Image (tube, helix red, strand yellow):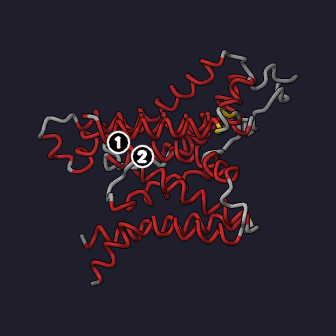
């Protein structure tokens, strides 16, 4: 009976929690289930979802990437500086941060695959290195339109209207970040669930030795997973910059825990038992709904960390207790 209860909790617990949260907040606040508020929730989770998609790739190959928050911060300040400091064309503003994110992922994979450093330790070290890089690059200052420069004068450029549309615009009444998020969620879902590459990724994470004996180039697969993680962290940074209209240092650090929590909540979504893109999106949505509802209840912002940490601990407890008994 106890095993059956735990199995049901693992399979339907996250969905039941989401239903309970939606019902509660809709009862205590009549504005909660309005179109405007629901689109605000989706817009607020768009950045976390992109960050979490990258973490999902590394978890699928049985790894873990702690550096995504710092990589996102680096992407944010690079994106802003390319417009405000150097006035580069928009294609370069978007492409160069993605290349930098891929380079960080490649650096991680070399530490893990070539030097055999455990994932957590390697990406922890990278997290501090990248954090130092973006603080050194900006000399500790955020980047905004025509900002004063330390060497004197003001920065020549400002944020492009076409770029800001990515984070602040709408198409057919739907916020652009929401559209971008759903496009990437759909793309990753197709790759992971309906392509040979998806099966190879899951095979590598499920049993690395068996995958190697089956002819899978395990090292190459893990390398690609970390590079993809870096690219998604950069995309999250670009979207964040477009949304706030400035390059904020340490923008990604607070979102790391939300991204990790989203992925682990997704582990148990409808009994998947593995990292999966639909579960990751659901986990991000659950955290977004909780934070939105608590904001409407005027809960102090400094208490939000308790909520995020509790969601992560609950997801980890359910996942690991079920996995141990299974």
Looking at the picture, how far across and down is residue 26, in whole percent?
Answer: 65, 67
Question: Is 78 left, or right, of 191 in this rendering?
Answer: right
Residue 115's spot in the image, x, y percent? Answer: 32, 40
- Mark 1 vs mark 2: which is more N-terminal? 1
Crowding near the residue tagged with mark 2, few <14, some 14–19, many ≥20 C-alpha atoms within 10 Å: many
Reading the image, the residue beneath label 1 is: 112
Q: Nearer the viewer, residue 90 or 207?
A: 90
> Farthest residue toward the left?
213
Q: Which residue is mark 2?
A: 122
User: Where residue 178 sits: x, y (%)?
Assistant: 59, 41
Classify residue 287 as left or right of residue 14: right
Determine whether label 1 and label 2 are within 8 Å by CB: yes
Q: Is residue 161 above or below residue 278?
A: above
The secondary element bearing badge 2 is classed as: helix
Residue at image coords 49%, 47%: 52
Left or right for 305, reference 215 = right
* Picture quarter with the N terminus: bottom left
- From the top left corner, tell me how far across and down residue 87 is, in percent: 72, 17
Q: CA distance from mark 1 to mark 2?
A: 7 Å
Q: Quadrant of residue 243?
A: top right
Residue 86, quarter of picture: top right
The tally of labels here is: 2
């Amino acid at each position: 009976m106890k095993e059956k209860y735990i199995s049901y909790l693992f399979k339907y617990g996250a969905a039941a929690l989401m239903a309970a949260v939606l019902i509660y907040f809709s009862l205590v606040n009549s504005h909660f289930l309005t179109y405007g508020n629901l689109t605000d929730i989706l817009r607020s989770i768009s950045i976390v979802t992109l960050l979490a998609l990258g973490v999902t790739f590394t978890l699928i190959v049985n790894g873990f990437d702690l550096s995504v928050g710092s990589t996102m911060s680096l992407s944010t300040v690079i994106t802003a500086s390319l417009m405000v400091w150097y006035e580069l064309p928009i294609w370069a503003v978007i492409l160069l941060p993605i290349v930098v994110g891929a380079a960080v992922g490649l650096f991680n994979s070399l530490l893990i695959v070539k030097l055999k450093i455990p994932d957590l330790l390697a990406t922890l070290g990278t997290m501090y290195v990248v954090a130092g890089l973006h603080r050194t690059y900006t000399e500790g200052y955020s980047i905004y339109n025509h900002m004063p420069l330390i060497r004197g004068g003001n920065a020549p450029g400002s944020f492009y209207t076409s770029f800001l549309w990515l984070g602040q615009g709408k198409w057919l009444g739907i916020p652009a970040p929401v559209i971008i998020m759903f496009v990437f969620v759909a793309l990753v879902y197709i790759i992971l669930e309906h392509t040979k590459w998806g099966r190879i990724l899951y095979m590598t994470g499920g049993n690395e030795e068996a995958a190697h004996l089956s002819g899978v180039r395990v090292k190459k697969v893990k390398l690609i997973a970390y590079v993809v993680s870096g690219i998604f962290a950069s995309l999250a940074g670009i979207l964040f910059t477009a949304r706030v209209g400035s390059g904020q240092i340490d923008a990604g650090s607070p979102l790391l825990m939300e991204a990790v929590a989203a992925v682990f909540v997704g582990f148990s979504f409808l009994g998947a038992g593995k990292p999966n893109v639909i579960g990751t999106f659901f986990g991000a949505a659950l955290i977004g709904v909780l934070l939105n509802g608590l904001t409407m209840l005027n809960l102090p912002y400094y208490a939000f960390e308790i909520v995020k940490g509790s969601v992560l601990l609950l997801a980890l407890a359910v996942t690991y207790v079920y996995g141990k008994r299974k």
